[in-house]
Image: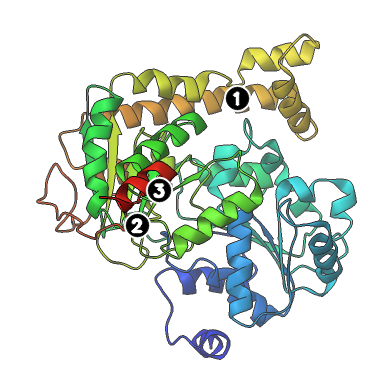
Amino acid sequence: MLQHELQKWFGFDSFKPGQQAIIEHVLNGKDTLGILPTGSGKSLCYQLPTYIKQKPTLIISPLISLMDDQVMQLKLHGEHYVSCIHSGLDENEKQQNMQLLKHSRFIFLSPEFLLQPHNFKLIQNLDLGLIVLDEAHCLSEWGYDFRPHYALVGKIIDHFPEANVLALTATAPPYLTSDLNQMLNKNFIIVKTTMNRENISLTHKNFEDDHAKLKWLLPLLEHSGPTIIYVSSKKMCLNLAKAIYQYGFLTGIYHGDLTYQERHTVQHQFINNEIPIIVATSAFGMGINKKDIRTIIHFHLTTSPSNYMQEIGRAGRDGAYSQAISLFQPDDSYLLETLLFADVITEEDVNTFELGMFLPPEKIEILEVLFSYYSIKQLRHIFATAFQRKKQGYHRMLGYKQLDQCRRAYMVEFFGEELSEKPNHCCDNDSELIDINIVNRKKVKRKMDYNEKLQNLFK
């Protein structure tokens, strides 16, 4: 029956691993957590049930680029009844999408938008059949000290008791299921394939300083194919992109301070191979539907295995051989610690908040949002737990840089997986790895000034 519906709606003859089990649970009214690797067709897991149930689906999504990509893919498939509202739209587009909401099969909104009372009124009377939490790991990773509205998603779900919930992610830290059950007061059925992407080799290199990193990196980019280089900050993003450009390559930058139009332009250029290299903060990646990314380089290590596996998973979505390379120098330890712990909310901050004493405005704003849903006792536990998780992930990544065993096994072990067998090109510790050899065009030709042009005329 499901194969018939799959052929009818999408023209496919068979499901990818994990898809059918997830869809069957959804159609049986079960709240489901689907953990499938990047590129394995997670979107189909809510699209097909939506067509079969003939009820609208709400997709709660973390990033504008992710919404834009999925809306575009649906429209390319011929779906007209789809709406999406986010801050990148102009006022006319927002109004058009608001008018479409009550007629839409697929509705894409962020938690911040939904939790504004005047916005929630737009959907509160819809007969939703399914609520999708796209990139569900964001509830654990972001839901307390970065985007607190994510931790309040339970308010939305409580309003639609007839709609079952489908949480989807490619990256599931070991505590994700318990977090979802607690945040949403649900008991999720788990369908998990693997987080291991066998076509991506893993390599790590240690250096004396950033200059040595750069000296190694620049020649590599001549033949690395479409490449994303992840850095820790906006400043480093600009500096590294400038160095790569001066070396001779067209290079894009991507960070959270760019405008919607700037981000959209860079994404478009990269997807269409107009620029071969992107230097980006962690803001880049979700919703970038480019299947032939060959190289992911972390100029700085990520702060957790979850982030690392999420980001390297953007390579090789076409199944072809790709590479993930991380770089480290001694000063990076301090950098990582600063990123993780400089502005972290602690149990002491929660106590200070309870007493009404002084806290930085950004911490007060986060705690006020959370306090609308959680008690002070719960908040103490939440932030004590979050601090321990950050430490655990940080130490796991520090261990990665000095590893003398299989990197792949070390990473997936963090997520409760074991390798049944290793691919031929696994990691630099246990395999002879293939060098990617896809030439990156094009060299930047420096424009001559007026005097140089005159000199050339008379040579």
Return the disc, 1 or 2, that comes first in the chain's sequence. 2
What residue is disc 3 on? 447
Q: Amino acid at mark 3?
A: Lys
- Label 2 sits on a secondary structure element that is loop
| Labels 1 & 3 near each other (Cβ < 8 A) | no
Q: Considering depth in this image, is 243 or 113 the residue closer to the camera?
A: 243
Q: Nearer the viewer, residue 408 or 227?
A: 227
> In the image, what residue occupies the spot 64% across and 68% down?
71
Residue 244 located left or right of residue 374: left
Query: Is the residue marked by circle 1 packed among few (<14), some (14-19), or many (20+) residues within 10 Å?
Result: many
Q: Amino acid at mark 1?
A: Phe
Q: CA distance from mark 3 to mark 2?
A: 25 Å
Q: Which residue is mark 2?
A: 226
Among the two numbered marks 1 and 3 on one chain, the one whose residue lies closer to the N terminus: 1
Residue 383: numbered disc: 1
Work out whether residue 75 or residue 58 is closer to the camera in this orientation and state it.
75
Q: Amino acid at mark 2?
A: Pro
